[in-house]
Image (tube, rainbow, N blue to C red):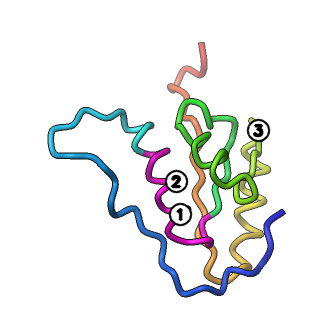
Amino acid sequence: GINAEYGDDSTPSISGLDYKLGDKVATRMAYGDALVKAGHSSKKVVVLDADTKNSTFALKFKKEFPDRFIECFIAEQMALEDIAAFRAIPNLVYFYRRMRWPAAGPS
């Protein structure tokens, strides 16, 4: 589980991603790569996922840091409860991505 031992002075960073100007990289793949890079740069980074880890490539983070990945499944309200609790942990940096359905809803 997540504990409150995030007192290190490291600041999460995504510098050093291997993308070059003009590279065609899907935004969702870049998101997953950036999460992993941030996770390597600081142990303060935690990722919450609402059953989107495959489509957002957050699965990469889960494989690298399973102890800092929280699967909330499709219950977004659970993720919001976790986020509210995380606000009580000083210096913790968390990422949360949810799927957005079109106005008409899923088809």
Residue assigned mark 3: 73
**Residue at screen point 64% across, 55% down:** 47
Quarter of the figure with the N terminus: bottom right
The three-letter amino acid code for the residue at tag 3 is Phe
For the residues marked 2 and 1, what is the alpha-carbon distance in whole angstroms? 6 Å
Q: Is disc 2 in contact with disc 3, using a CB cutoff of under 8 Å?
A: no
First of labels 1, 3 by sequence position:
1
For the residues marked 2 and 3, what is the alpha-carbon distance in whole angstroms? 20 Å
- Check disc 3 and report its element: helix, strand or loop: loop
| Mark toward the viewer: 1 or 3 | 1
Residue assigned mark 2: 36
| Mark toward the viewer: 2 or 3 | 2
Residue range (magenta):
31-45
| Circle 3 residues within 10 Å: few <14, some 14–19, many ≥20 | some
Dominant secondary structure, magenta: helix
User: Which circle marks residue 9 in the picture?
Assistant: none
Residue assigned mark 1: 40
Give residue 64's position: percent from left, percent from top.
Answer: 63, 51
Q: Nearer the viewer, residue 1 or 49?
A: 1
**Residue at screen point 61% across, 63% down:** 94
Instruction: Identify whether 105 is placed above or below 68.
Output: above
Give residue 83's position: percent from left, percent from top.
Answer: 70, 63
For the residues marked 1 and 3, what is the alpha-carbon distance in whole angstroms? 24 Å
The three-letter amino acid code for the residue at tag 2 is Val
Q: Is disc 2 in contact with disc 1, using a CB cutoff of under 8 Å?
A: yes
